[in-house]
Every structure is written in structure tokens, then in C-alpha cells.
Amino acid sequence: MWTRAELKDNAKKFFKFNYWKMVLVALVLTMVGGGGSSVSSSYTQRTSNNYRYGSMSSAEMVGFIVGFMVVMLVVMVIGFAVSAFLLNPLVVGAQRFFVVSHYQKAELGELGYAFSNSYMNVVKTMFLRALYVFLWSLLLVVPGIIKGYEYRMIPYILAENPGIDTKEAFAMSKQMMDGNKWNAFVLDLSFFGWIFLSLFTCGILAIFYVNPYIYMTNAELYVALKEITFGNAPTGYQNGAGYQNYQPNQGFQNYQGYQPNQGYQDYQPNQNYQQNQGWQNSQGYQNVPNSQQGQNYQSGTGYQDMNQQNGGQSDNGQQDDNFRM
């Protein structure tokens, strides 16, 4: 079973290993997630100021309303197109960067991964995810929040297998988050102190530490839930094609930080993944026996072979599960 302390400790290790690139990708991801909300509001303010004073005839009023609706419709269509066809694939690429960082030093080229790998499937699946959360939110706020957590893993699933069937991606995310929604919610709350503190630095702390730290921790949550739910293969994925030259127990030497040229063994740039081989034939991971679940996610070492004899012993001590700053 994963703990907040374990996820955060791992995130800090990987964050330090690839600091500046993570800062840049986190900045892109933050801008993609938070942009596009000021266009309509600024237009509304200008038009309301223009017509606030003075009288208008009924014909002018009708013309204003029709013109306003047309402009708003155009803005909505443009915003939808930009979000669906540009921003969502960027989100998937950014999340891929953080997932790859769990195993090896990721490159900035991961940002564009979704544009060249099953692009339309990524667009469709991410659009349906947003649509379903929106429709559930129309009922009440709480159902929308619950569904948001239920579909939380979809961008990460697409990041590793962009060609996966949409229904399977939703089903896998639901299975991974089953019984973990509340713990994931508490994990999000545990960053409130950092977010609050970053307000006093005009966002500087958020750019250079808080945001990359949060994104990397969320990627660690995905890796942990994936291993607990579906198990793991000794070299990362089935047939060893997921990551190049990945050797178990060599990610970090004896948990003593990063040694020069010993971060990841035999890492070759531009060989992070083989295209569309994350999950073989879009079949996802096979469930593992319950007796094996939750035993293979070890601090700071990526994937561990559950039957490996020469790996180091896992830490059997219970880590402090209180909120970590």
C-alpha cells in the first residue's frame, strides 16, 4: 500500500535529478491547465462599459444581444478547438514526461509525444473525460469531484499507451482509483501549505519548486497504483520494451541520493519508449493475485522484480504518513 510520505520522498529524489527540465515542463502544464478563462470575461467587461450609459432602442438592444451571443459562440468554439486539439495532447505529453522521470532522465521531447502517437484517440479520450466530468458536475458539485478523481489516471494511461481503447482507459482508471479516491484527495490537501506559502512569493516558489513537486508526486501516485493494481514486469513493461536498458535496483544507489553518472544505467537519449509498446496490443495489465498486490512499489527504485533474489531488501518499517511539506 502506498503512503503520502513514500510518494513525496520519491518525487523529491526524481525532481532533483532532472530539476530544470521539470521546472519548464511544470510551467507549461500549469499554463495549459489555467489558461483560456480571461477572454470572455474581458470582452464582457468592455462591452458592458460601452453600453452602460445612454439609451438604446429595442432594435439596437436586439442587435447587441445577437452580436454578443455570436461573439461568445465563436469564442467558445475557438476555445474548445484549442483545448481539444492542442492543450489536451500537451497535458498528456507533460504527464508522460513525469512518468518517464520515474524510470530515467526524461527529455523535453516527451511534451510532443501525443501529437505523433495515436493523436486522434488521445483527443477523443481526453475530450470525453472532460465532458463526463462536466455532465456529472451539473447534477451537484460532489458527483463531479468524485468523477474527477475516478478519471484522474486517464492522462497517465494515455501517456504510456496513446492507442488504448477509450472504454478500456476509463475502466482502468476506475479500477486503479477504486478505494483510493479519498486518499488521493487527502494527498492533494497535503500540498495546501506549499500553495499558500507560494502566494507570498508572487508565484516564484510555485514555479521553481511547488508545481514540479506536485506533478512529480502525482506521477508517483500513478506508478504506485499501477503496480498495486496490475503488477509489474521485471524491466518495466511486457517483453521488456517499455524502457531502454532499465535495470532493477540501479535507479538510485542504496538510497543515498544521486551519484555522478549513476542516476540510471545505460540511459540513451531519445530511447525512452518504443512507440505504442507501453501496453501490448492495448490489453492493459493483467491482474495479479491479491497476495502479490501492494508489495512491489519500493521507495525511489522504479519497478522492482517481485521474484528478484539479488535486489535489496525493502524497507519494512512504516513511514510517517502525516502531511509532508
Image: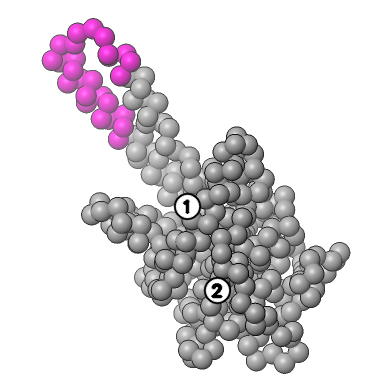
Instruction: Indicate which label's residue lies in the foreground, 2 or 1.
Output: 2
Relative to 252, 219 lies left or right = left
Task: State the image coordinates of residue 83 (x, y, percent, origin top left).
Answer: 44, 46
- Packing grade of label 2 (10 A; few <14, some 14-19, many >=20) is many
Q: Secondary structure at mark 1?
A: helix
Residue lying at the far right in this picture: please name it.
Answer: 260
- Which residue is rendered at x = 65% and y = 92% of the image? 307
Could you tell me what secondary structure mostly forms the magenta stretch? Answer: helix
Is residue 304 among what the camera can see?
no
Q: Which residue is mark 1?
A: 88
Amino acid type at image mark 2: Trp
Q: Name the outermost residue toward the left.
A: 58
Q: Position of residue 33 (x, y in %)?
A: 49, 46
Q: Which residues, given as a range, are shown in magenta? A: 48-73
What is the number of callouts on the image?
2
Of residues 232 and 205, which is closer to you in this image? 205
Name the spot of residue 164 as percent of width and height, x first.
Answer: 46, 70
Secondary-structure class at tag 2: loop
Say if 195 sits above or below 174 in the image. above
At 53% from the left edge and 78% from the top edge, which residue is drawn?
Answer: 1
Ranked by sequence position, the earlier of labels 2 and 1 is 2
Residue located at (84% from left, 66% from top): 259
Please determine whether, in this image, residue 62 is positioned above or below residue 29.
Answer: above
Q: Which numbered dot is residue 292?
A: none
**Circle 2 sits on which residue?**
2
Q: Amino acid at mark 1?
A: Asn
